[in-house]
Amino acid sequence: MKHKVKLNLERLNDPGLISKGKVVVSSMTNNQFYPEPYPAYVASLSKINDTIAVFEQAYLDGLSGEKQKIALRKKIRAELIDQLKDLARYVELVAKGDLQMLTSTGFDISKPAAAGSVKADHGHVTNMRISRGGKRGMVVVKAKRVRGAASYQIYMTTGDPTVEANWMEGGVFAHCTNMEMAGLNLGLQHYFRMRCIMSDGPGPWSNPFPFMPT
């Protein structure tokens, strides 16, 4: 069984899709295995990047709860997913199962399952949510409890979330509900990510979640 690109982008929430799109565009830019221009049915990286920017703004606008803005957000989300899927299929076609080529793209890659293997999701954070706190410049982070987690760690950045050096620790919490972070810069886009600290070490990071403190 060959390695393949995971095409289930619909499972990502809006912030996760924005983050994944940025990672893919960054990884595919000047990628030696996939030089542009692409075939006509595949959107250029410039076009995909433009769609991500429009979708990110539509996501923020949709937080107001207005029906028209939510409908626009959904429309642009579907367009972005289609563009990324077309690119993913092209990547798969060119790579022909080559793991190095596939992992260079920023897409999630499925691993061939060994006979009798059991899928594990050890220490993986799910349902991460962020809302405004009770004070200016405060946010409240919540997530679904992970069995066996000793604590929960949050990192944040106001820079490019695809650059590891931009991230800094925001705090370590004993529980994954009502994790408050204060003193954040008002009106500035922040990205947050979270992981569990298990008995055998830290689990994987969640997808970056964009949020603007007010």
Image: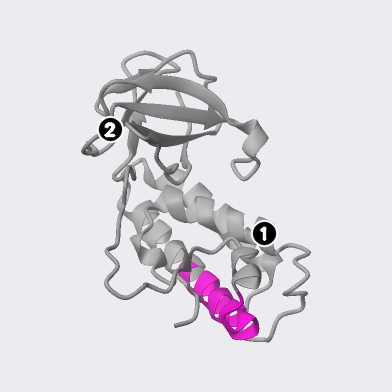
Q: Mark 2, residues whose alpha carbon is within 10 Å: few (<14), some, or many (≥20)?
A: many
Q: Could you tell me which residue is drawn at 55 percent across and 74 percent down?
A: 88
- Residue 69: image location, x then y, percent: 39, 52
Query: Which residue matches tag 2?
Result: 149
Where's the N terminus, which quadrant? bottom left
Image spot of residue 166 (x, y percent): 64, 32
The amino acid pointed to by label 1 is Ser
Given residues 121 and 141, the one toward you in this image is 121
Ranked by sequence position, the earlier of labels 2 and 1 is 1
Give the SS element for disc 2: loop
Quadrant for residue 124, please give it.
Answer: top left
In the picture, the quarter occupied by the C terminus is top left
Classed neighbour count for the residue bearing mark 1: other residues with Cα under 10 Å, few (<14), some (14–19), many (≥20): some
Numbered mark located on residue 27 in the image: 1
Which colour style is shown?
Answer: one colour
Quick one: 85 or 124, which is closer to the camera?
Answer: 124
Give the residue at x 74% y 74%.
33
Q: Is residue 127 at all visible to an observer of this figure?
A: yes
Relative to 186, say whether 21 is above or below. Answer: below
Q: Please tell me in which quadrant of the rendered image residue 204 appears.
A: top left
For this rendering, which residue is in front, 144 or 59?
Answer: 144
In front of the other: label 2 or label 1? 2
Q: Nearer the viewer, residue 17 or 197?
A: 197
| Gap between marks 2 and 1 measured at Cα | 32 Å
* Secondary structure mostly seen in the magenta stretch: helix
Number of the label disc, if any, that sits on residue 195: none
**In the image, is residue 159 above or below residue 92?**
above
Q: The residue tagged with tag 1: helix, strand or loop?
A: helix
Q: Position of residue 135 (x, y in %)?
A: 36, 13
Q: Residue at x 41, y 57 (%)?
A: 73
Residue 159 shows in this picture: no
Q: Which region of the structure is painted magenta? A: 81-98
